[in-house]
Image (cartoon, coloured by chain):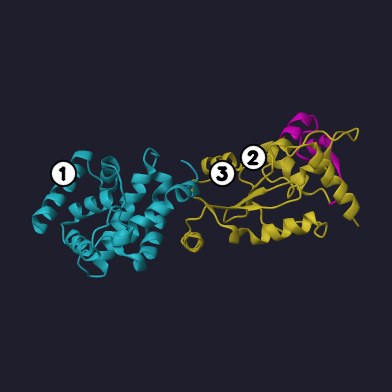
Amino acid sequence: MPPFQTLLDNHAADVMAVLRGAVGRGDAEDCFQETFLAALRAYPKLGDDGNLRGWLLTIAHRKAIDHHRASGKRPLPIAEPGAIAGATAEPELDEGIWALVGALPPKQRAAVALRYACDLPHAEIAAALGCSPDAARRSLHEGIKRLRKELA
Amino acid sequence: MKAELRRLADRAAAEGLLDVAYANVDSPFGPLLVATTPRGLVKVGLPNYDPAETLEDLAERVSPRVLEAPARLDDVRRQLDDYFAGRLHEFDLPLDWRLSRGFRLRALRAIDRIPYGKTRSYTEIARSAGNERAVRAAGTACGANPLPIVVPCHRVLRSGGALGGYGGGLPMKEALLRMERASGT
């Protein structure tokens, strides 16, 4: 296994960006610490360094879910509108969209956020969600279909 | 991100998850990579070695839980600074010897006892390590010293007084010996 520091060097910024999107700026730091401590704990026994980025994003995703559960909140909007690529329409509309995204079932919400807020390809969304690329594609598709319906 | 990473290293250490902490330290010869385990200093990487390779080696031989955590090496950095300034003649650091074993370990422990400003021959080190005829092996032990400078393998010379070898290059060995002679009491 590579020295753990190389994981931080290569992926810490991405993990932080994903967490800011998932739990908001204020709570992202705590989730970031929890994510990397959990990763550090499991790392020596991981035994496969094939997709460390996907592995880290999976842990970050779980920590974000834990965080939402612990705070007793409903799943929250995924990202600050400013951080979302292509979110150039009126701010009100954007906030509306992300509030709707926040109301999606967890897998769909995560898939939509990872795709559009974090710009991840399907394979990495799958790795982050711990499912097959097909299942990730389906979650994303279902999520978008539902958003379309709500907006129509 | 710096503050977050510092906090992560602190928390990892508090939870027993920081197996190898490392830092880069300036020296008159170039940057040194120093690494410590909870037991003590485990590695000093000389400037002519690739730090990335050194870290990979530590990840493999000690633990992959390797983090950059300069605060955990403050004491090491201070003592090295003082040594290079000629102010410190004997390091007072806990050492983790786990990267050496057998004859090499015995040879390095003998080298660790050579006083500041003095030298010994490879033969003398071989004898102290329990096998007077293993002169070449004593040389190999010096070459494989994971803790150069702190465990002063630069104080080991050929029997006739010739420099022999040095992992950091002969000019560095010569400069260290010259500095110690000038600063010695």
Q: Amino acid at mark 2?
A: Arg
Asked if the residues shown at circle 1 and circle 2 are in contact, with their CB atoms under 8 angstroms apart, the answer is no
Q: Amino acid at mark 1?
A: Arg
Q: Estimate the x, y position of residue A118 in percent, counting from the top left.
A: 31, 51
Asked if the residues shown at circle 3 and circle 2 are in contact, with their CB atoms under 8 angstroms apart, the answer is no
Q: Estimate the x, y position of residue B104 in percent, counting from the top left.
A: 69, 38
Can you tell which mark lies on residue A138?
A: 1
Q: Do callouts 3 and 2 point to residues on the same chain?
A: yes
**Foreground pick, A69 / A151:** A151
- Upstream in sequence: badge 3 or badge 2: 3
Q: Chain of mark 1?
A: A
Q: Estimate the x, y position of residue B12 in percent, counting from the top left.
A: 47, 59
Whole-number angstrom distance, CA of label 1 to CA of label 2: 56 Å
Observer-side mark, 1 or 2, equals 1
SS class, disc 2 = loop
SS class, disc 1 = helix
Q: Is residue B58 found left or right of B76 in the rendered image?
A: left
Query: Is residue A117 visible in the rendered structure shown here?
Result: yes
Asked if the residues shown at circle 3 and circle 1 are in contact, with their CB atoms under 8 angstroms apart, the answer is no
Chain drawn in yellow: B
Q: Colour of chain A?
A: cyan
Q: If the image is split into quadrants, where does the C terminus of chain B sit?
A: bottom right
Q: Which residues are magenta?
A: B116-140
Residue located 38% across and 44% down the image:
A52
Q: Please rate how many residues cluster around mark 1, counting C-alpha atoms within 10 Å: few if below 14, some from 14 to 19, many from 20.
A: some
Q: Amino acid at mark 3?
A: Leu
Whole-number angstrom distance, CA of label 3 to CA of label 1: 41 Å
Q: Say which residue label 3 marks.
A: B55
Q: Say which residue label 2 marks.
A: B101
